[in-house]
Image: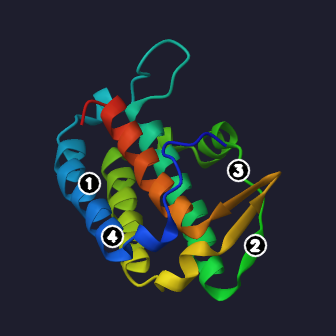
């Protein structure tokens, strides 16, 4: 699993601040995504690369996987879940065959819900751990890295 940020001290992490950051990203990116013509969104960004539509589909997959991790780590102190095969998830879910407006709406709705869930994370739970292979990733890191991952892809799309 690629990391997009370095782990912070969980004592310094504010779920409310992270939630606000995610909401800000959605508020900024959603109108820009909606303004992209569907024909443009469907075109690969480069030969052999995903289209904008598939990148947003990948972010939907990331949101659903991280939502599971964030919810489960609020219910138990440690989880052992697999990662996910990002290329396979995008291929199987065929985001490129959905209307662009539906892909954007799903991305925005999932991330708004994720921001809501993050806002209500108990600070004491930020040290809970996802066992991922040989890694022990804290809930605080998962949340911070998810937001950094989202920002990375949105920047890559020029948003």
Judge depth for marks 4 and 3 and give the one in front. Answer: 4
Quick one: 33 or 17, which is closer to the camera? 17
**Residue tagged 4:** 19
Residue 3 appears left or right of 103: right
Please tell me whether mark 3 sits on a helix, a strand or a loop.
loop
Looking at the image, is 47 positioned above or below residue 15? above
**Residue tagged 3:** 84
Q: Position of residue 29 (x, y in %)?
A: 23, 48
Cα separation between marks 4 and 1: 10 Å
**Residue tagged 2:** 79
Q: Residue at x 50, y 59 (%)?
A: 63
Residue 36 disc label = none
Label 2 Cα crowd, 10 Å radius (few <14 / some 14-19 / many 20+): some
The quarter holding residue 41 reads top left
Cα separation between marks 4 and 2: 22 Å
- Of mark 3 and mark 2, the one earlier in the sequence is 2
């Amino acid at each position: 699993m690629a990391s997009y940020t370095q782990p912070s001290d969980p004592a310094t992490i504010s779920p409310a601040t992270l939630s606000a950051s995610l909401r800000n990203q959605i508020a900024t990116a959603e109108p820009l995504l909606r303004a992209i013509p569907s024909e443009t969104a469907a075109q690969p960004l480069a030969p052999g690369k995903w289209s904008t539509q598939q990148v947003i589909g990948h972010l939907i997959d990331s949101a659903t996987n991280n939502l599971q991790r964030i919810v489960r780590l609020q219910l138990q102190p440690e989880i052992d879940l697999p990662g996910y095969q990002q290329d396979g998830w995008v291929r199987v879910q065929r985001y490129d065959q959905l209307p662009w407006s539906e892909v954007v709406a799903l991305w925005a709705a999932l991330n708004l819900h994720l921001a809501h869930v993050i806002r209500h994370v108990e600070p004491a739970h930020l040290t809970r751990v996802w066992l991922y292979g040989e890694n022990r990733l804290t809930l605080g890191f998962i949340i911070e890295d998810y937001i950094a991952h989202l920002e990375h892809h949105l920047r890559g799309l020029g948003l």
